[in-house]
Image (tube, rainbow, N blue to C red):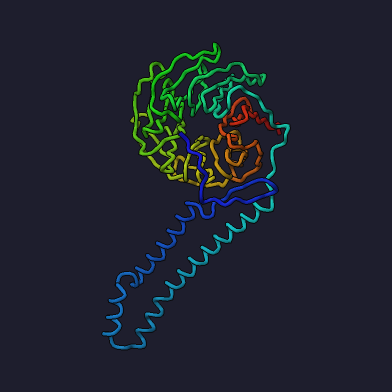
Amino acid sequence: MSDTAASSDTRVLSSSGDTIASPGMSFFSRVRVAALVLAALGTLGLTGCGGSSPEAVDEESSSAPSNAGDAQVADDTAAPVQADLEAIESELAASQDRVAALEAELSVQPIPALPGTALRRIIVAADAKFVSVGTDSVAVVGPFGAYAAIDPATNTVTATGLVASGATRVLRTPSAMWATNYDGNEIVRVDPIADVIYSTFSFPAPDGLAKDGPTLIVASHDEAFIARVSPENGEILNQVDVQGKPTAVVVTADFGIWAAIFDTGELVQIDPESFEIIARVIVGAGPVGVTVDAGLAWVTNHEEGTVAVVDLTMSEVVETIAVGAGPTEVAVLGDHAWVTVTDAGNLIQIDTETYKIITQTPLGASSRGGPTGIAVGNGSIWVAVQGERSVVRVTLPER
């Protein structure tokens, strides 16, 4: 189940009443620093200064005859080493200057919010936390298992009920609505037309949920595995140990199955045929939400307040974006990625070409929650706002 503790490696900057969090030094910055230090040590080794202990160097100096020419050669050899160290220090200083400049820019230039005309709040009986959009219906489920169905044509609630004691995800397919009941160790299938529970089957601590052809892909958060499950009877057809606590899962046509692993900070790739892990990518602290678009995976790192962008062809992070405290889920519509930043209470809009934040819209945050689940469909972005018993529909004007 997704943890919600805020990262300790985050500084909060105030900007005209908005809060924007940016890492003091991100995981990736530390990796770059380590690489530079290793490069310096390698240079020292190549020049003959790193292979002997200080004691050995002293002995050689005392036993060798004094020679001014040799001393000059030694000085000439040491010069490139000194130059490399100075270059490293200069690059580190420049990096720190860039971070300081970014922080200063964020503090004096508030990010605009979406116009109120683009937002429509739909009240639902359930405390909304997770949302999924089908072809003609929007499914919403709350943290305590109440659900609602919304007709996107009229923005009205067409069905409500109780499906679980503790829900973690919801999935709307053409013929059914699926919900994971984490507390009850089961997966529930609801007929949203008849407004009844169609079936339930046992599954240990289910969290992430996705459809793959006729089967379901389900993450067992506590048991540390991903499984392919028959929707007819709940039989586990395949499973793989992911060596951590899986949260979100996503199925792609070209890149297989991907799952976020909360405690190891990874995104793992699973081959749909062999059902084995074929790649692991470190994305950041506490990943809980994943979506894939145009060969890129967008991952929300809840613990460090960032979104990581992963090139699925290369299996590497190509960008990390600071979005604020406690991001939960992410969706892509057109040229923009949309992120729910739960703890800060914001909806963030990001340009998928430049990776720049375009808008930051306050949707509300309290001790009961804030914007959490997000999905796209019917030309809109749908955001479940926990603690508000509502779903916010965002529809941008056509250009």
From the top left corner, tell me how far across and down residue 41 is, in percent. Answer: 38, 65
Instruction: Evaluate whether residue 217 shows in this view.
Output: yes
User: Which quarter of the rendering shows the N terminus?
Assistant: top left
User: Which quarter of the rendering shows the C terminus?
Assistant: top right
Q: Is residue 122 left or right of 295 when viewed as pictured?
A: right
Give the residue displayed 39% in from the left and 21% down from the top.
202
Give the residue displayed 46% in from the left and 31% down from the top.
250
**Relative to residue 299, is residue 43 depicted above or below?**
below
Q: Residue furthest front?
A: 367
Q: Is residue 245 left or right of 375 when viewed as pictured?
A: left
From the top left corner, tell me how far across and down residue 222 is, in percent. Answer: 39, 33
Give the residue displayed 55% in from the left and 21% down from the top.
147
From the top left corner, tell me how far across and down residue 385 is, in percent. Answer: 60, 31
Q: In the rendered image, which quarter is residue 375 located in?
A: top right
Q: Using the image as rendered, state which of residue 373 and residue 272 is in the foreground.
A: 373
Q: Using the image as rendered, state which of residue 282 and residue 75 is in the foreground.
A: 282
Q: In the rendered image, which quarter is residue 226 located in?
A: top left
